[in-house]
Image (spheres, rainbow, N blue to C red):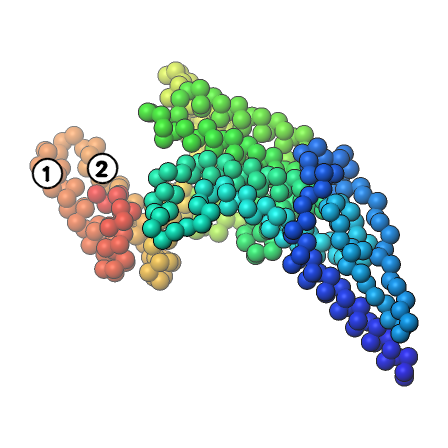
């Protein structure tokens, strides 16, 4: 019985010592700078690409036998100015990989926090008479701030990958419970491959955003050279992805993350499409995109435009035959942003979801009658205007009755009901 009690006491003491180690590291390790051996982390060892630095683990901290029979742990046995040695020692005492990642990320955040504050361009010490908000709004280029923050974040990601073989973005989102867009959609890949794919995608996203940022500065939007550069970036991204993924992985990637798959998910909103329906639509549209997807209609000659229109009609016919009349109508409805706006509206005002479909039905009827009136050459101008006005008034009354006055007024006031004009 006495031996059992002694064993329990020793176990509790060991747990207390380990908890103390973690608390101490989180609070005091931050002041230690990166050592020269690990400071220049742009030149990573080849072993780092395999997920974990190939650092020999130092011996376990020595436990000294005191006269009273207790073991004394010295903090200095764990602490090191060299981050690689520091990580290796944490592993040597049995620190779990997740706890290790949390410690190093928290350590690095505090270490680089001053640089992040400097990147924001704020005054080091603010006085009450200084108009810092106006300065931040008018005197600081937000694009430059974002660029500096990205550079610092990139440094952090390289350091974390070098030290513990983890992706910083994934770890941050996992710790905070945020939705990780890429992680949820790349689950079919092993962790290391997911990291390489997401970093490739983020790199090309930044390059594309850099080009698109010029759109608002140039009269007439993007130039022909800019659009050509965007096409080249997308082709290059496809080429580099093909080097990372085998054919089956590439197919799954396309279903999860390609622009075409995103467009189909947008169009099938509200119809609860099955996997079979989704894949059928995807196959029909992928055939069209393979031939016409990268060609701009306004740059085609008349003969090519006619061929493009014929290909579009054939694609829609194929989808309609696959879905049937009713399901195809739901697919067309989902392709219309007006339906998405209506769905958001009824949710905002806590109306039944069916109200979105009801109001969208009024839109279809109004648009059909309006097209018939405008295409009838025998109608005198006054009768045409009177008929159009009657359609407008009847449609507004029906929509108001369906939504109620509050939702209806909001719908008009926010400019979402342009189709009723």
Q: Which residue is mark 1?
A: 383
* Residue 180 position in % (x across, y down): 56, 49
Give the quadrant of the C terminus: top left
Marks 2 and 1, the one that precedes in the sequence: 2
- Left/right of residue 290 with respect to residue 3 in the rendered view: left
Q: Depth check: give the residue in front, 354 or 75.
A: 75
Quadrant in the picture for residue 226: top left
Instruction: Identify the residue at image location x=10%, y=33%.
Output: 380
Asked whether disc 2 touches disc 1, contact meaning CB atoms under 8 Å apart, the reply is: no
* Residue 41 position in % (x across, y down): 69, 37
Residue 289 appearing in the image? yes
Location of residue 264 with respect to 355 vertically, above or below: above
What is the crowding at mark 2: few (fewer than 14 residues within 10 Å), some, or many (at least 20)?
few
Residue 268 appearing in the image? no
- Left/right of residue 170 with respect to residue 327 in the rendered view: right
What is the crowding at mark 1: few (fewer than 14 residues within 10 Å), some, or many (at least 20)?
few
* Residue 340 position in % (x across, y down): 38, 48
Q: Depth check: give the residue in front, 187 or 287.
A: 187
Location of residue 26 with respect to 198 vertically, above or below: below
Query: Which numbered marker is on residue 361?
Result: none
Instruction: Identify the residue at image location x=42%, y=20%.
Output: 224
How far apart are the alpha carbons under marks 2 and 1?
A: 13 Å
Q: Which residue is mark 2?
A: 372
Farthest residue to the bottom: give it.
1
Q: Secondary structure at mark 2?
A: helix
């Amino acid at each position: 019985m006495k031996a059992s009690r002694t064993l329990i006491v020793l176990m509790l003491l060991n747990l207390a010592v380990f908890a103390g180690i973690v608390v101490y590291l989180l609070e005091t390790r931050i002041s230690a700078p990166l050592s020269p051996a690990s400071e220049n982390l742009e030149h990573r060892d080849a072993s780092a690409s395999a997920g974990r630095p190939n650092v020999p683990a130092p011996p376990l901290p020595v436990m000294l036998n005191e006269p009273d029979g207790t073991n004394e742990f010295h903090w200095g046995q764990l602490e090191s100015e060299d981050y690689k040695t520091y990580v290796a020692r944490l592993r040597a005492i049995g620190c779990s990989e997740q706890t290790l990642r949390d410690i190093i990320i928290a350590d690095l955040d505090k270490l680089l926090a001053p640089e992040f504050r400097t990147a924001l361009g704020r005054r080091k010490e603010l006085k009450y008479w200084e108009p810092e908000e106006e300065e931040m709004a008018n005197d600081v280029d937000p694009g430059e701030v974002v660029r500096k923050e990205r550079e610092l974040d990139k440094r952090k990601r390289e350091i974390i990958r070098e030290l513990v073989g983890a992706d910083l973005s994934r770890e941050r989102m996992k710790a905070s419970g945020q939705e990780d867009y890429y992680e949820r959609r790349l689950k079919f890949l092993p962790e290391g491959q997911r990291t390489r794919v997401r970093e490739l995608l983020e790199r090309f996203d930044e390059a594309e955003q850099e080009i698109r940022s010029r759109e608002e500065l140039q009269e007439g939007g993007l130039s022909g050279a800019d659009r050509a550069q965007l096409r080249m970036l997308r082709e290059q991204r496809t080429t580099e992805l093909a080097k990372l993924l085998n054919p089956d992985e590439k197919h799954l990637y396309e279903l999860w993350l390609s622009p075409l798959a995103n467009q189909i998910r947008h169009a099938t909103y509200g119809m609860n499409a099955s996997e079979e329906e989704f894949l059928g639509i995807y196959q029909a549209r992928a055939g069209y995109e393979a031939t016409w997807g990268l060609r701009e209609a306004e740059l085609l000659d008349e003969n090519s435009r006619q061929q493009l229109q014929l290909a579009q009609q054939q694609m829609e016919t194929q989808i309609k035959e696959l879905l049937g009349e009713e399901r195809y109508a739901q697919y067309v409805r989902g392709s219309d942003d007006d339906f998405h706006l209506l769905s958001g509206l009824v949710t905002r005002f806590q109306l039944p979801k069916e109200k979105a479909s009801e109001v969208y039905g009024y839109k279809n009827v109004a648009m059909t009658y309006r097209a018939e009136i405008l295409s009838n050459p025998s109608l005198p101008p006054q009768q045409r205007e009177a008929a159009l006005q009657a359609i407008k008034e009847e449609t507004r009354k029906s929509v108001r009755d369906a939504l109620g006055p509050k939702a209806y007024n909001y719908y008009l006031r926010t400019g979402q009901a342009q189709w009723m004009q």
